[in-house]
Structure formats: structure tokens, C-alpha cells
Image (cartoon, rainbow, N blue to C red):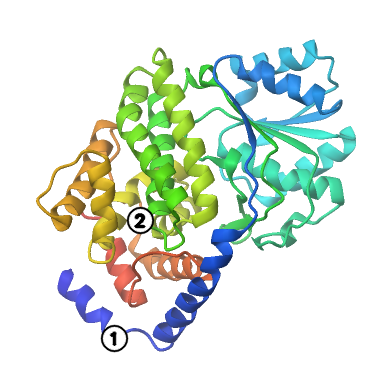
């Protein structure tokens, strides 16, 4: 396998090297722009009772007819009833749109837009996981300004702000309540489309750990690893800054310390839930500034082709991509390892220790970083989709694949037990 990768690295497909050079140049030109973009961050209310504080803020802002946007299963949960009770106590004339599903597509977005318009809404409340918050980011401005949602994927194409937006994450993972991006699925091509806009960041984020206490262990694990992926890809980004570095190192430490606790005793360990909510939010703040990388590009294909939930897909891919980065980002990975208290005699051994620590964390969370679902016949198209996403964005990654064949070999390597 290693010989195959080495050979393919020196015989890229025609045009691949030129394309890679162009996109590297684009990423370099975009670096100062990303570092200085005026990206807003939401006001945050956190801790127990934050839900009531959030509703009080809606009243203070003059919101009277909000639409609550959530997923099909969430409406039956007690935490959702807590929100409705708070809205009723505040005499708000709310309506509920509960058709969001994991990886929502444009047809669902369009139905949400119609619902908001019919309600004559003046605000939105997203409650649930990242899919509900991402969907709301697109529904809200498109409903307010009569915009076709299928026209807004891409960089800064959505320029109008929606109504007042309160986001209530009930998982600690996506950080979507803090980001300027939303991922929507094209139901025709089954590919994920990314909307990046400075106008979609919620005005208010409600981080209430009590809403996360009943999260099942498997979802706790997957969403927590999603947050870790955000922090690690952000730290390894070429757009990283001293400020994002500090937040990311802090988030990584929180996750390594508290995610196993939340996984094993999440119904009782409120402190672990609180720390994970903070880590997830801060990682959302940082990767909005720095973007992500190969882990996300590959994970998006696992979701599009095989329905693997995004957090789980990131968890399965992360240790493999970190291993790929060893010759490209050894010093940065060693810095991460030192902050996590890992041991090694030099940068090389510390970077290896970081990869092993992520594998060990996956073991603790009962996640196998093994892509057994991938079909051989899908790999060539997967590779092209991955390259298209990573280079179109462009993702400011520390290391690049030299050819489609090299990436295809890498994908096959993730299918083989180590």
C-alpha cells in the first residue's frame, strides 16, 4: 500500500498538479481575508436556567411570533416541552416546524420557508442538533427576503439577514450555534452543499447542560468527536491565529477530560455536560474563522453515500487524517500533544502519541475508525468529490494529496483494520 501511494504521488493525473497549485495559491490569497473577516459571534447565556433567560431575551427584543424549528423526533422529548412552556408563559404566539431530519435537503428547507411565511414570523428558535440549527440558518433569511434557497450555497452568496435568531443546541458537537456556515443536502445529487455567510450566525446561543442530560451514549460520543475534529482541524489550519490556537487547545483538553465522563455517566454528570457544551461552542467559534480540512471533506462523502451521521463520520476519519498529516504538521501536532499531557522524546514521537491518543479515545467511546461501509466501486467518484470540496472551498490544510490515485489508496487504507 505504501509503495502504491509513493508511486502515484509522482505520477498525478493530467491537470491535477496545476489545479492543486492554483487552489493552494487561492488559499494563500484568502488567508488574510479569513483572518480579518468581521465574523459575528452570538451572545451566550449558559448554565442551568439558560433556557428561561433565552426566552426572556426574546421578549426583550420585541419578538412576538417566533417559529420553533426542530427535528421530527425532538418534539416528543421533555426538553422540547420545557421550551414550549417557557414560550407560553411569556405569551408568545409561536408556531412549530418539526420536519427537520439529519442532513436536511432543500425540499425540507423550502417547506420551512413556506411555514415561516404563513405564520408571519418575526423570529426563529432552532432547538436540537446541528441539522436543526443549520436548516434554520437558511430558512430564516430566505423566508424573510423571498430568496430561493437553492441559489445560496457557496461563499458569501447569502447577504441578507433574517429575523432575530435564537439557537439552542441540545448536543455538544457541531458548534453550529456559533458558525457562519450551514450544510444542506442536494436531494438530486445527494451531495452536501455548504452555505457560508456572515449573516447566518445566530444573535443568541443558549447553552443549557440540563438539556443534554438525556443524550444517549452513542450520540454523546459522535457529537463530542465532532467537536474534537473542529478543534483539531482548526488548530492545523493555515488560517490559525494566536486567538484560535488558545481556544482550540483549551477545547481539546476539555474534550479529552470530559467526553469519556459524559459518555459513561451523561445522565448524571452535569459538569461533564457543561464542559462539553463550552468546548463545542468554542470550537464552533474557531473553525468559523479557520475553516476545516480533509476530515470533513471525507466525512461528507460517508454521509452523502452511506448515511453515516456527520459526527460519527468525523470520528472514524480523524485518526487516519492525523496520521496522514505527520510529515506535514509534526511540530503543530506535537504542540497539541504537549497541551494534552502526552509524552514523547521529540516532536516526532509526540505527534505519533497524538494519533494514538485519538485512537484510544475512540476505543473508550466504542467507535471503530474503520470504513467498512465503503464500496470499492464508489471510491473513484468519492475521491473526486472530496478533492472538489476541499479545493473549491478552499480548505487551508497543512498537507495535500498528490493525485486522485493517492487519495483513493488512502481511502482503501481506512477500510483495513490496523
Secondary structure under tag 2 reads: loop
| Residue 108: % across, % down | 70, 44
In the image, 143 versus 272, the foreground residue is: 272
Residue 30 image-quadrant placement: bottom right
* Residue at which label 1 appears: 11
Residue 15 image-quadrant placement: bottom left
Secondary structure under tag 1 reads: loop
Q: Is residue 70 left or right of residue 316?
A: right
Q: Is residue 185 left or right of residue 56?
A: left
Marks 2 and 1: CB-CB under 8 Å?
no
Q: Crowding at label 1, few (<14), some or many (≥20) Cα neighbours within 10 Å? A: some
Numbered mark located on residue 374 in the image = 2
| Residue 238: % across, % down | 42, 63
Q: Measuring 39% from the left and 55% from the top, which residue is drawn there?
A: 295
Q: Please say whether residue 246 is visible from this viewpoint.
A: yes
In the image, 303 versus 79, the foreground residue is: 79
In 3D space, how far apart are the residues under numbered discs 2 and 1 (Cα atoms)? 25 Å
Query: How many numbered marks have been drawn onto this rendered protein structure?
Result: 2
Q: Measuring 54% from the left and 67% from the top, which residue is drawn there?
A: 32
Q: Is residue 395 left or right of residue 74?
A: left
**Mark 2 or mark 1, earlier in chain:** 1
**The N terminus sits in image quarter:** bottom left
77 above or below 123?
above
173 above or below 61?
below
Q: Residue furthest bottom?
A: 14
289 above or below 308?
below
Q: Residue furthest front?
A: 242
Q: Measuring 44% from the left and 47% from the top, which residue is drawn there?
A: 230
| Residue 173: % across, % down | 47, 37
In the image, 68 versus 340, the foreground residue is: 340
Q: Is residue 244 left or right of residue 249?
A: right
Q: Please say whether residue 101 is visible from this viewpoint.
A: no
Amino acid at each position: 500500500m505504501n509503495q502504491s501511494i509513493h508511486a502515484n504521488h509522482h505520477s498525478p493525473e493530467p491537470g491535477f498538479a496545476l489545479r492543486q497549485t492554483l487552489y493552494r495559491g487561492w488559499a494563500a490569497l484568502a488567508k488574510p481575508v479569513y483572518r480579518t473577516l468581521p465574523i459575528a459571534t452570538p451572545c451566550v447565556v449558559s448554565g442551568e436556567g439558560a433556557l428561561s433567560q433565552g426566552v426572556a431575551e426574546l421578549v426583550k427584543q420585541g419578538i412576538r411570533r417566533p417559529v420553533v424549528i426542530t427535528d421530527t423526533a425532538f418534539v416528543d422529548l421533555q426538553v422540547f416541552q420545557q421550551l414550549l412552556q417557557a414560550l407560553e408563559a411569556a405569551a408568545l404566539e409561536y408556531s412549530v416546524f418539526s420536519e427537520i431530519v439529519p442532513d436536511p435537503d432543500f425540499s425540507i428547507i423550502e417547506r420551512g420557508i413556506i411555514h415561516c411565511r404563513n405564520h408571519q414570523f418575526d423570529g426563529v428558535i432552532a432547538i436540537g442538533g446541528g441539522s436543526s440549527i443549520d436548516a434554520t440558518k437558511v430558512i430564516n433569511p430566505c423566508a424573510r427576503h423571498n430568496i430561493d434557497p437553492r441559489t445560496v450555497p457557496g461563499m458569501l452568496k447569502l447577504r441578507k439577514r433574517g429575523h432575530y435568531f435564537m439557537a439552542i443546541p441540545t448536543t455538544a458537537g457541531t458548534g453550529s450555534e456559533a458558525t457562519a456556515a450551514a450544510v444542506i443536502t442536494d436531494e438530486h445529487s445527494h451531495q452536501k452543499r455548504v452555505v457560508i455567510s456572515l449573516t447566518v450566525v445566530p444573535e443568541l446561543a443558549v447553552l443549557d447542560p440540563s438539556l443534554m442530560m438525556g443524550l444517549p451514549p452513542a450520540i454523546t460520543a459522535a457529537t463530542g468527536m465532532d467537536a474534537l475534529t473542529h478543534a483539531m482541524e482548526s488548530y492545523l489550519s493555515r488560517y490559525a491565529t494566536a486567538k484560535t490556537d488558545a481556544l482550540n487547545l483549551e477545547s481539546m483538553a476539555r474534550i479529552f477530560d470530559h467526553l469519556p465522563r459524559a459518555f459513561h455517566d451523561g445522565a448524571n454528570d452535569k459538569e461533564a455536560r457543561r464542559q462539553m457544551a463550552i468546548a463545542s461552542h468554542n470550537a464552533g467559534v474557531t473553525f468559523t474563522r479557520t475553516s476545516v480540512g480533509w476530515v470533513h471533506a471525507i466525512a461528507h462523502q460517508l454521509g452523502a453515500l452511506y448515511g453515516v451521521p456527520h459526527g460519527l463520520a468525523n470520528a472514524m476519519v480523524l485518526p487516519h487524517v492525523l496520521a496522514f498529516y505527520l510529515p506535514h504538521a509534526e511540530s503543530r501536532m506535537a504542540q497539541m500533544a504537549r497541551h494534552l499531557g502526552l509524552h514523547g522524546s521529540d516532536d516526532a514521537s509526540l505527534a505519533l502519541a497524538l494519533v494514538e491518543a485519538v485512537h484510544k479515545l475512540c476505543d473508550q467511546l466504542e467507535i471503530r475508525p474503520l470504513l467498512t461501509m465503503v464500496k470499492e466501486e464508489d471510491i473513484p467518484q468519492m475521491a473526486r468529490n472530496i478533492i472538489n470540496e476541499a479545493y473549491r472551498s478552499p480548505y487551508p490544510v497543512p498537507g495535500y494529496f498528490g493525485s486522485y490515485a493517492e487519495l483513493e489508496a488512502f481511502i482503501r487504507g481506512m477500510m483495513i483494520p490496523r
